[in-house]
Image (spheres, rainbow, N blue to C red):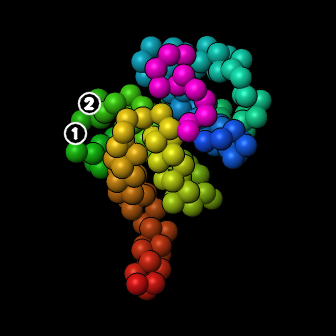
């Protein structure tokens, strides 16, 4: 696929990428395809499953992420909009897809600490997005985490404040 996904490394050596990281990368590629061409889920998944290194990804997590974001994208866009400084439609395609995936994980994977989700999203934005897109992703998802996971967010903030 041309564009920001000409490499699947995301800037990381292949050995350091976990199956979940790979699943997030492939889900991002699928969301990008959907965002730009409105391809259907089945064709996106079929295309990606034929991609090099797909067998090293967490296939179940990939499928949950891709299908979940596509099923909930309108709700996720609404949740994100309150944290954005511009209309969702004005975001770069990569940032929009990273934010949708991060928002989906924040809302649907409470067992994953919000900082892990934000850090993974930052890495995706660094690997595939624009120069400073990762900073924007960080700020937006941090605001969203405070809304979606107030107890976890406040507990983490209290710990950071005490450490100072």
Few, some or many residues within 10 Å of mark 1 (<14, 14–19, 20+): few
Q: Position of residue 109 (x, y in %)?
A: 59, 52
Q: Residue at x 40, y 84 (%)?
A: 164
What residue is pinned by disc 2?
Answer: 90
Q: Position of residue 128 (x, y in %)?
A: 48, 33
> Considering the numbered disc 1 on the image, is that residue within a helix, a strand or a loop?
loop
> Considering the numbered disc 2 on the image, is that residue within a helix, a strand or a loop?
helix
The verdict on residue 10 being magenta is yes
Residue 160's place in the image compared with 53, above or below, is below
Horizontal side, residue 59 vs residue 4: left or right: right
The verdict on residue 158 being magenta is no
Asked whether residue 81 appears in the rendered view, the answer is: yes
Quadrant in the picture for residue 139: bottom left
Q: Position of residue 44 (x, y in %)?
A: 59, 18
Q: Residue at x 24, y 35 (%)?
A: 87
Residue 146's place in the image compared with 107, above or below, is below
Asked whether residue 38 appears in the rendered view, the answer is: no
Q: Residue at x 47, y 48 (%)?
A: 122
Labels 1 and 2 touching (C-beta < 8 A): yes
Q: Position of residue 27 (x, y in %)?
A: 58, 32
Residue 77's place in the image compared with 118, above or below, is above
Whole-angstrom CA distance, mark 1 to mark 2, is 7 Å
Horizontal side, residue 112 vs residue 107: left or right: right
Q: Which residues are magenta?
A: 1-11
Residue 146's place in the image compared with 138, above or below, is below
Give the label on residue 86, or none: 1
Few, some or many residues within 10 Å of mark 2 (<14, 14–19, 20+): few
- Quarter of the image that includes the N terminus: top right
């Amino acid at each position: 696929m041309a564009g920001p996904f000409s490499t699947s490394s995301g800037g990381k050596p292949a050995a350091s990428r976990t199956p979940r990281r790979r699943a997030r990368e492939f889900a991002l590629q699928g969301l990008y395809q959907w965002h730009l061409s409105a391809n259907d889920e089945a064709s996106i998944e079929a295309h990606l499953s034929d991609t090099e290194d797909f067998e090293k990804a967490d296939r179940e997590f990939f499928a949950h992420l891709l299908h979940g974001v596509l099923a909930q994208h309108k709700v996720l866009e609404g949740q994100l909009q309150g944290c954005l400084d511009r209309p969702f439609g004005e975001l770069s395609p990569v940032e929009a897809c990273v934010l949708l995936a991060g928002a989906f994980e924040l809302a649907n994977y409470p067992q994953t600490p919000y900082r892990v989700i934000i850090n993974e999203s930052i890495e995706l934005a660094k690997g595939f997005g624009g120069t400073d897109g990762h900073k924007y992703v960080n700020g937006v998802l941090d605001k969203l985490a405070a809304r979606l996971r107030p107890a976890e967010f406040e507990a983490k903030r209290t710990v950071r404040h005490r450490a100072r």
